[in-house]
Image: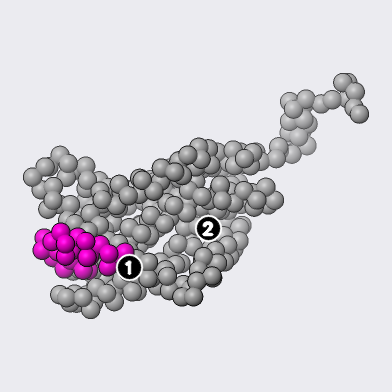
Amino acid sequence: MASAGDRVTSEELAALGREHGLRPVGRRPSLGVYLAQLWDRRHFILSTARSGLASNTAQDRLGPLWLVLNPLLLGLAYYLIFGLLLGTSDQVEDFIGFLVIGIFLYQYTARAVSEGARAVTGNRRMIQVLAFPRAALPIGLVVRQALGFLPAVGVMLVVVLISPPVSPVTWHWLLLVPVLVLVTLFNLGVAFFAARLTAQVNDVGQLIPFLLRLWLYASGVFFDIRRLAADQPGLLAVLELNPVHIYLTLARDAVLYQTVSDARYWLLGTAWALVLTVLGFLAFWRAEEVYSRE
């Protein structure tokens, strides 16, 4: 057993480490080093995303078909409730296409938030065993969601094509590509914030389903916000800042109505995507030491 004189304080160990170019376990690296580490592990991120996508539906008979069936079934349920029972379809042009685009894109973001919130708390063992930048976890989850969403986009467009009134294919459909890029970046930013908050306060995970439900109704997934709040300009101005509503508007204008959305929507959608991704990443990186101690 070491004597009192043989004991070394934490400060002395830290000084010794600095003298020899060592750093404490779990210490947050500089931003530049952190980004370089993430780039070096890009193949690891892609591999975990693919394996996670396959394992999600491995036990189901229909397997990956559920990635498409889930939003389709939700769309059918909302069509029966809002389209037929409540008569919303009479107030929205091309309601089936309007609803399908809303459900598919909203579910894409909602899954990123739900999965992102568990990025750290659901991978404790990996964090304890392996040394890697923890931002790889939410990034991998968002990449997994993006890979799973690609076939769903194809199904979404087919439904739009065959549902009355038939929407013709025009060059405007190409605008869906930048919209999906913006949505994916936005999802990544939200996943970063959700992962950090849940890692530090586990109760946040219990609030997320309620917040997602509220977000669903505030985004105009199955009704036209601009028509519903037309006589309340203050409320409409607030609702139109909702990023999900912005991305739904961009996608619907391009695919359903063959028009280019107002430049204001493109600017707001780009700002939400870029700013939230950068701020979310920085917020997650600043708590890197916290994840290693959990």
Residue drawn at 48 percent across, 61 percent down: 143
Q: Dividing the image into 4 quarters, which one contains the N terminus?
A: top right
- What colouring does the structure picture have? one colour
Measure how far apart labels 2 and 1 are at the Cα level: 27 Å
What amino acid is labelled 1 in the image?
A: Leu
Q: Residues within 10 Å of mark 2 (few under 14, many from 20)?
A: many
Q: Is residue 227 left or right of residue 196?
A: left
Towards the viewer: 153 or 57? 57
Q: Visible in this render: residue 154?
A: yes
Residue at the outermost top position: 4
Q: Does residue 162 sit above or below 262 in this rendering?
A: below
Q: Which residues are magenta?
A: 74-97
Residue drawn at 31 percent across, 64 percent down: 74
Under circle 2, the secondary element is: helix
Q: Earlier in the sequence, mark 2 or mark 1?
A: 1
What amino acid is labelled 2 in the image?
A: Gly
Under circle 1, the secondary element is: helix
Residue drawn at 61 percent across, 58 percent down: 41
Q: Visible in this render: residue 282?
A: no
- The disc placed on residue 73 is 1
| Residue 60 place in picture, x, y as percent | 50, 71
- The disc placed on residue 140 is 2
Viewer-nearest of discs 2 and 1: 1
Q: Is residue 220 left or right of residue 193?
A: left
